[in-house]
Image: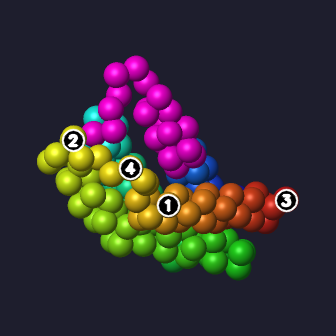
């Protein structure tokens, strides 16, 4: 196993762990904490997801560069990298700005919190699921190609 291959494998599972822990564990649980209001939870979520997406972007760039400079990547791994990176780009460029505008409105007038969840939020979660599936596929394909 080359150093580049090992780096991509490690980054893949670090990325997967971060997304799983924050998106599917921390985010829903934060609203169950005592004293956490919707505006407070949204404010915390904004900070957490900005940080998560920033770290994800750095990791994604590192993975893409490693795949470009390395060789012998399984085709499945290359497709999985493309899917994971594309999902992240859609989240950052398209969905998060919509969610940010909604959060701005709630924070500007906390007494008028919308009753129903944003459709953009559901899209964000959908792309998280796609990204997680792509990262599992990437990691699995890398492990299987070394055996």
- Residue under numbered circle 3: 147
- Residue under numbered circle 4: 115
- What is the chief secondary structure element of the magenta stretch? helix
Residue placed furthest toward the top: 34
Instruction: Please give the range of residues in magenta.
Output: 19-39
- Residue under numbered circle 1: 122
Pinpoint residue 120: horizontal percent, then vertical percent: 41, 64
Answer with mark 2 or mark 4, whichever residue precedes in sequence. Answer: 2
Answer with mark 4 or mark 3, whichever residue precedes in sequence. Answer: 4
Q: Is residue 27 magenta?
A: yes
What residue lies at 63% left-to-right and 71% top-to-bottom? 80
What residue lies at 43% left-to-right and 54% top-to-bottom? 117
Answer with mark 2 or mark 3, whichever residue precedes in sequence. Answer: 2
**Disc nearest the viewer among 4 and 3:** 4
Mark number displayed over residue 110:
2
**Disc nearest the viewer among 3 and 1:** 1
State the CA–CA distance, disc 3 to disc 1.
Answer: 38 Å
What residue lies at 50% left-to-right and 70% top-to-bottom? 87
Closer to us: 128 or 84: 128
State the CA–CA distance, disc 4 to disc 3.
Answer: 52 Å
Dots 2, 3 in contact, CB < 8 A? no
**Quadrant of the image occupied by residue 89:** bottom left
């Amino acid at each position: 196993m080359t150093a580049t291959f090992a780096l991509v494998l490690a980054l893949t599972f670090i990325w997967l762990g971060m997304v799983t822990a924050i998106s599917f564990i921390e985010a829903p649980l934060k609203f169950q904490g005592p004293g956490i209001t919707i505006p407070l939870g949204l404010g915390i979520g904004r900070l957490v997801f900005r940080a998560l997406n920033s770290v994800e972007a750095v990791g994604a760039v590192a993975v893409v560069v490693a795949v470009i400079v390395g060789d012998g990547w399984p085709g499945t791994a290359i497709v999985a990298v493309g899917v994971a990176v594309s999902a992240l780009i859609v989240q950052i460029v398209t969905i998060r700005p919509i969610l940010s505008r909604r959060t701005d409105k709630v924070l500007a007038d906390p007494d008028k919190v919308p009753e129903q969840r944003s459709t953009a939020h559901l899209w964000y979660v959908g792309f998280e699921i796609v990204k997680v599936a792509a990262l599992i596929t990437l990691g699995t394909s890398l492990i299987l190609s070394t055996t």
